Image (cartoon, coloured by chain):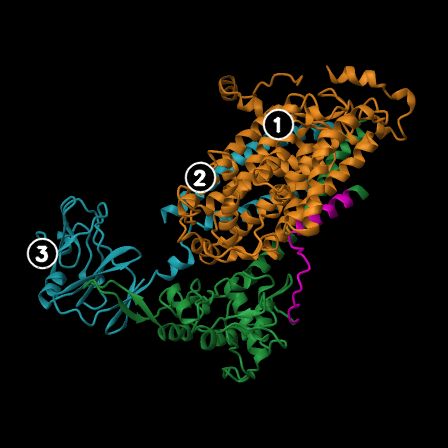
Amino acid sequence: MSEEKYIPKSKIGQWFDSRLPLLSLMHHLRDYPTPKNLNYWWTFGAILTFCLIAQIITGLVLAMHYVAHADLAFESVEHIMRNVNYGWLIRYFHANGSSMFFLAVYIHIFRALFYGSYKSPREMIWILGMLIYILMMATAFMGYVLPWGQMSFWAATVITNLFSAIPFIGESIVTWLWGGYSVDSPMLTRFYSLHYLLPFLIFALVILHIWALHIPGNNNPVGIDIKQPSKDTVPFSPYIAVKDLYALIIFLIITAGFVFFAPNILSHPDNYIKANPLVTPTHIVPEWYLLPFYAILRAVPSKLGGVIVMFASLFILMFLPWLDTSKVRSAVFKPLSKLFFWVLVIDVVILGYIGANPPEGLYLLIGRVATIYYFLHFILVLPVLGYKEKTIPLPISISDPVLGGQPNISTTRSREDIKEKQHD
Amino acid sequence: MINKLKIFFVILIFLFSSGLKASEKKTPFIDTNWNFKGIFGKFDRGELRRGYQVYSEVCSGCHSISQLSYRNLYEKGGPEFSIENVKQIAASFDVLDGPNSDGEMFTRPGRLPDKFVDPYPNIESAIAANGGAYPPDMSVLAKARKDGPAYIYSLLQGYVEPPKGYELDEGVYYNKYMDGNQIKMPNVLFDDLVEYEDGTKATTEQMAKDVSTFLMWAAEPNLEERHKLGFRVILYLVILALLVYFSMNRLWSRIESKK
Amino acid sequence: MSSSYLILTTIIIFLLIFLYISWIFISNEIENKKETGERRDFLYTASYALGAVGLGAAVWPLVDQMNPDASVKALSTTEVDISNIDVGKSITVLWRGKPVFIRRRTQEEIIESQNTKLTELKDPQKDQDRVKKPEWLVMLGVCTHLGCVPLGGKGDYKGWFCPCHGSHYDKSGRIRKGPAPTNLPIPKYEFVDNNTIKIG
């Protein structure tokens, strides 16, 4: 970050900024040199920040009316939908906003996978991102329990029961989580408390995530290092800010489509039945964004094995910067990696589809194959491909492609040059 | 561009994959035209009023609708009966109130803010009175089943003779559209069962349609407002997107020219 | 009344903060424009204006949801059966969560209240202006000092006496002695018929 120190124009500004450099921070954010070749896949960071703030605001407003007790929760949600001014709008926005939040986070993660944004020196950004993702899933899971519908109750029962798979202490942990001998009001109230808390932890991690990003600066579609600032960068405001805003508006149009015209299409009708401990729904399914993990969980025949493998599928992602041995970041220049990227995408979609169906017959078989392939991708494909793949030569700078034509031999660099550059 | 499209469709499939279920042999529901479907969907006031009549004369003996208040019947977006009419409807029910200054509970005629009175004092008595099955509360029933209104509409007309050799348990009836084909609720709709106040002929199909629409409103009383606001919001966002898009291009043209 | 002003002030303050922050971001662009000599930015102005409108419209539901909801508003009127109240007796009913005193006054109480000199009153108000039918006194049983519920038939003026800080009200519910500044408030009410009062 080779920027000149910012001096506020007014005396008050200088007094304030010398004691708490908020004005300097705002100016850094305004002028932050961003690669000028970023495409729309890079707008999802800003979209995600909006989603987080929107969920927090709609959530805390819902919390003014929701009652977290087993006897009253379901009715309090109906009270919000029917009586609270614009309650239906805020509730549908919060519920569908959660789905859109995950849609955005998956696009954001797959962008990182494709363009190698997790590779050195951005490993911390990636790890923080994974922690944010895990907290998001915990938050969403607990949020889904709050309406106390059939799916809320039974998803809570199934997932908390998983902990009983832990040898020796498993049962005690489950009783401790429940605060009782089954899922009931005590668990609901503690889930409410944690559901309110976790988003603020996520917010803190997001600040760290952005801070870690601003050290090396953004990655870009071509994946080569650039100097900041330079003719390869533009100040964040207004250029990137406007682009993020445009992308956000399109994202909001899609969100509005769900909220206003299909608000229940992504959720399960059984959640409009009040929780009944004596009746289990025919098919217990989580929300769509948790389906791939649900498939992995049920692919393994043993209970403990399923839990371990499911958590492993998450934690293996943490090690991605070290599993991927390629010296080239962006899949634009790695045709084989690009192919396997799409195979992974299809694999995850298949896992999602399997998660929505009962774990038997052909579904179970495909689920097992897809789970094994998922792990193979990270443990086998990526490391091997990193060494073996013949990559397309990289351009020297990101301005070059704009000059037209394919980069010719003289403007490309050898692997050795690239290795030096990346260890700067 | 092709890649963007690929990704878009992959995500779309992902999103809707939870809706795709195994090909369980289910009889498809009876097809009919629903006024409230689609982005310009609205409720037909006549259907809602007739539907209320069916609910009140046929269903309410067993099925509660406890999240509805009597005042909902005159509020905008619903059957929109006159307020005087609704006061009378409410007053025709006995509501439990109290304790009074003697410490006793008492009943009084219903008022507008009261919730709809339940046919049974508690769930256990509802189950006991209906052969061991609980007649579900109807407040959100239309959202609690996949294709709720179509399901209710078909189920009410789906009572037929069981196929030859089919074993039917005691106190259970055969219905084409019920999951598992066995249902504890008997057939309740017969032609001309109700005399509609607006003079419409009360065929079984008509009553099924009207009560299904009524139940859809009961589950989603804000449907019309939601559609109206949604149209305006999306129109606004599209216009804003266009303005921002052109602003963005104008801004970025500086970069191209400054090479 | 004052709560709406408070909300309005808060919104204006937030708007100003928002405008200041956006000015910091925009000022960069204005410098650039001077360099490139760009033409009038009607497009930008229109975008900002439309955006601000949308932001305001989006904020409104978040503010409005704190206003009384439909179920609370439905309970904002209460009908009271007064046919069983004898002369010289009072009842207390709950309306919008607060006590309302309904007293069927005796002739002596009415005459005494009507004849009170206005100069003797801390908050001058004619008895006739406090009742629709002189026999029926309908007022909020909330002391205007700090909100306690006064006790009936007590106090130096044999009206109501508030035990919290010693405010004395007369037979018309007017403040006579003590820290309370104004008379016991009269809510909006009407006689639906001779036996029923609708409050609110």
Q: Mark 1 falls within which chain?
A: A
Looking at the picture, how far across and down is residue C145, in whole percent? 21, 46
Check the image and report above or below for B129 versus C44.
Answer: below
Bounds of the magenta segment:
B4-31
Q: Are marks 3 and 2 on the same chain?
A: no
Front-lying residue, A344 or A396: A344
Residue behind mark 3 = C158
Local crowd size for mark 2, using a 10 Å CA cut-off: few (<14), some (14–19), many (≥20): some
The reply to whether label 2 and label 1 mark residues of one chain is yes
Q: Residues within 10 Å of mark 1 (few under 14, many from 20)?
A: some
Q: Which chain did the renderer colour green?
A: B
Residue under label 1: A127
**Mark 3 residue type:** Lys
Residue located 66% across and 39% down the image:
A106
Occupied quadrant, residue B247? top right
Residue B173 falls in image quadrant: bottom right
Q: Secondary structure at mark 3?
A: loop
Disc 2 to disc 1, C-alpha distance: 27 Å
Q: Amino acid at mark 2?
A: Leu
Q: Is residue C115 above or below residue A236?
A: below
Mark 2 and mark 1 in contact? Answer it, CB < 8 Å.
no
The label on residue A177 is: 2
